[in-house]
Image (tube, rainbow, N blue to C red):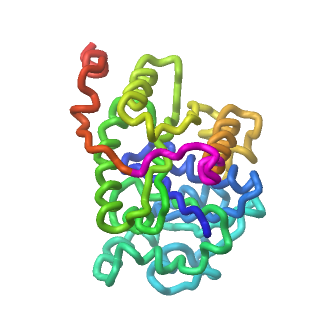
Amino acid sequence: MSKIISVANQKGGVGKTTTAINLAACLALSGQKVLIIDIDPQGNASSGLGVNLRENQKGIYELLAGNASLDQVIYPTEIDTLKIIPSNVDLAGAEIELVGRDHREKILSMALNGVNAEYEFIVIDCPPSLGLLTLNALTVSQSVLIPMQCEYYALQGLSHLLKTLQRIKKSINPNLKVEGILLTMYDNRTLLTSQVENQVKKYFSEFLMKTIIPRNIRLSEAPSHGKPIVLYANRSKGSDSYVELAQEVIQRTKGEMVSPKTELQEITYEEWIKENQLRDFLKK
């Protein structure tokens, strides 16, 4: 059985796709058989791994629409043990097309039936929204990895996202848990970074991953070359951090570390920032 991890955050620009690509690549290079599914209409995970669908090729859109089988939409990557179901702009209209389907939140789950036995990990790169495509990903997943940029406005959506996950867990997928909150674009030179980190530790310490992803030039360059960071610049800090993240995920999966608890505590954003210095800092 595969462990299916959705990489999700309704806020864009937090390192979600970068995390999906590089976690999948590092898991694969550590000896795991991995499938990455690009369910974001922007298709950045696909292009970031050097996979761009030609006009006659089929991807995740055709799979969800019932116009292709699994074996028609799985493509190789530069890493032998990493495969991908790619996306393209055709997926942009999928939410409208799928909304009238029966069991619309389980379309991806039904489409992936039988693939679990072939891979140790399946990583899903979700759109930066909480729409039907993301709901499908969360319905089929065992856990959610939440990348979070160390900036003030990134805090605002986290409480809302955790409440959404709580509702999905109660009503659709009782096995869903939080894999962890991953701090990304971390810059220890800034006061705001340390303040955001401290607030996450204070209120959500049970979810926080030990690995931290630094702000790194090589990491931002890699997607334009169609390569994960471990192939583009394997001696960079960005590469080291994602190798560390992959090992943390593997260890948690094997039970060598205590995984974050599955129950999501009720907390509002206002409660979260209460009695901290962020508001005073931003007023300056």
Looking at the image, residue 211 lies above or below residue 63: above
Q: Is residue 224 visible?
A: no
Name the quadrant of the N terminus.
bottom right
Looking at the image, residue 16 lies above or below residue 53: above
Residue at 29%, 66% (x, y): give it. 171
Q: Nearer the viewer, residue 259 or 131?
A: 259
Is 26 displayed left or right of 95 in the figure? Answer: right
Residue 252 coordinates in the image, percent (x, y)? 60, 48
Q: Nearer the viewer, residue 204 or 80?
A: 204
Q: Residue furthest top?
A: 284
Q: Is residue 220 visible?
A: yes
Number of labels in the image equals 0
Residue at 21%, 33% (x, y): give it. 270
Name the quadrant of the C terminus.
top left
Residue 99 coordinates in the image, percent (x, y)? 30, 76
- 161 in magenta: no
Residue at 61%, 76% (x, y): give it. 115
Is 195 displayed left or right of 35 in the figure? Answer: left
Question: Is the magenta region chiefly helix, strand or loop?
Answer: loop
Residue 26 coordinates in the image, percent (x, y)? 69, 50
Looking at the image, residue 60 lies above or below residue 216: below
Residue 174 coordinates in the image, percent (x, y)? 38, 64
User: Magenta part of the protein: which range?
Assistant: 251-262
Residue 24 sits in which quadrant?
bottom right
Is 173 displayed left or right of 237 in the figure? Answer: left
Q: Nearer the viewer, residue 213 or 47?
A: 213
Residue 271 sits in which quadrant?
top left
Residue at 35%, 32% (x, y): give it. 203
